[in-house]
Image: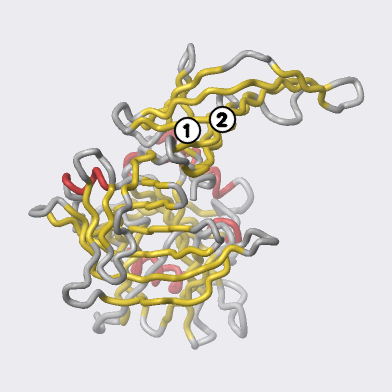
Amino acid sequence: MKKNIAMMLCLVMLLGCAAALAEYTNIGAVNVNGAFEARCVLPEGYTLETSELDNGGLVSMITSQDTAKPLLILSIMFDDMYADVNKLNDLDDEALAYLESTFTDEYDMDITYTETAYGTKLLVAKEVNGEFADVYTIYAGYEFEFVLIPTLEGGADSLTEEQIQLVIEFLSNLDFVALEDDAVPQPEGGKKFENDWAIAGGLVQVYYEEEGYRVTVNVEKEDGTGALWQYACYYMEDTDSLVSVSSSRDNYTIDPDTGDTVYTDTAYDGIDEEGKSTVFTIDAHGCLIWKDGCDDAGAGLEFANIGRFDGVWRNEEEEVEAEFLWNGADEDSLFYTVYIQRGVEGADHYALYLMDGSYDPATGKLSAEGTCTLFTKNASGEYDSQDDGELVDAFFSMLENGKLLYETANGIELEYDIMGHQ
């Protein structure tokens, strides 16, 4: 078959039930990465059981209590080779011949083709001894593979032609349906709030999520005590503000020995009472103003815009990595520590830059200055280090495509590493 059964099953399988339809009982809807649904119906007497794989995908086994009935397995996975292929119908003869060879290289297979009631071509691969059958198609770059094998316990050793035809008939109902985009677009006026904001000892982070905003406020005192506020907000156009619908406050202390955050109690958590909503606005100086509806904790505080750089950014091609650490603020400035590494550890040579950076919301750029240390592997395999001695300037800004622009004399673009940014 095209892939080993144990390795090929992945991505998302969700199935719902509906009223009886002819000799079928369950209507299934496979939601594929939120882009579209594959819909069909289950044969009579079959039930679905889905479990998650280590690679993040799901395997869906469709079984019957009747041990004489075969086991059905559905897998869906995206294949970069078919990224531009809308349907299996679009493959030319050469591509189909290659596809068929992936089934016949290891097994003696009989290859035929059929179509669903909606015109989607299906490749049907039957192992000549009846050990298994495989029905395969492509839609929007995703490979759909439906494997039929004899039941695992108490059944026959091979499939009958009648059983294989049952699967083909089952899949003749397969349909692909685009999902309607019912997401509410982010309000234009609310976009300016979606950023990180800071004062000495305090950080506010604002994220847009589906139909509203998630706002977290973390304020820590010099004595090692602090609190974390979390709000679910919506944008109110009339007042140009974010207004909360639910709020929570968790108090904590910092363990002086380990530096760990130890949460001590929850002051409140739930839907905001009438007249108790929290409001966030941006004043004439571009600062975020926090008016808490429960304990007025934000009184007198003005949070400055510090951009959203915190995390790790990479450019694999150039072997450049940048890490930004938000280090807080003093009375005069808001600052980041920036580490930039050119080359990889283990190589004969690599360079490490250590810089202090500050963000200017007027230009949208973080400017940084620091020094460079060169590392060279010696004969014993250890590294000798040498400070360059000259100050290095760098500028960083966010691009519309979500990447970070790292500007020096020649300008390097660093791609965002999602695993590095929390």
The residue lying at 67 percent from left, 22 percent from top is 351
The local crowd at label 1, few if under 14, some if 14 to 19, many if 20 or more residues have their Cα within 10 Å, is: many
Tag shown at residue 316: 2
Q: Earlier in the sequence, mark 1 or mark 2?
A: 2
Q: Residue 203, how many percent across, how many down? A: 42, 51
Q: Amino acid at mark 1?
A: Glu
In this view, 384 is above or below 270? above
The image position of residue 191, as x and y in percent, is 23, 45
Provide the secondary structure element on which disc 2 rests: loop
Residue 113 seen in the figure = no
x 60%, y 61%: residue:
6
Q: Quadrant of residue 216?
A: bottom left
The foreground one among 174 and 362 is 362
Front-most of residues 219 and 384 = 219
Q: Residues within 10 Å of mark 2 (few under 14, many from 20)?
A: few
Cα distance, mark 1 to mark 2? Answer: 8 Å
Residue 192 x/y as whole percent: 24, 43
Q: Give x and y (percent) for residue 45.
A: 40, 85
Residue in the picture at 56% in, 30% down? 316
Question: Image check: 103 left or right of 46?
Answer: right
> Amino acid type of disc 2?
Glu
Residue tagged by mark 1?
Answer: 415
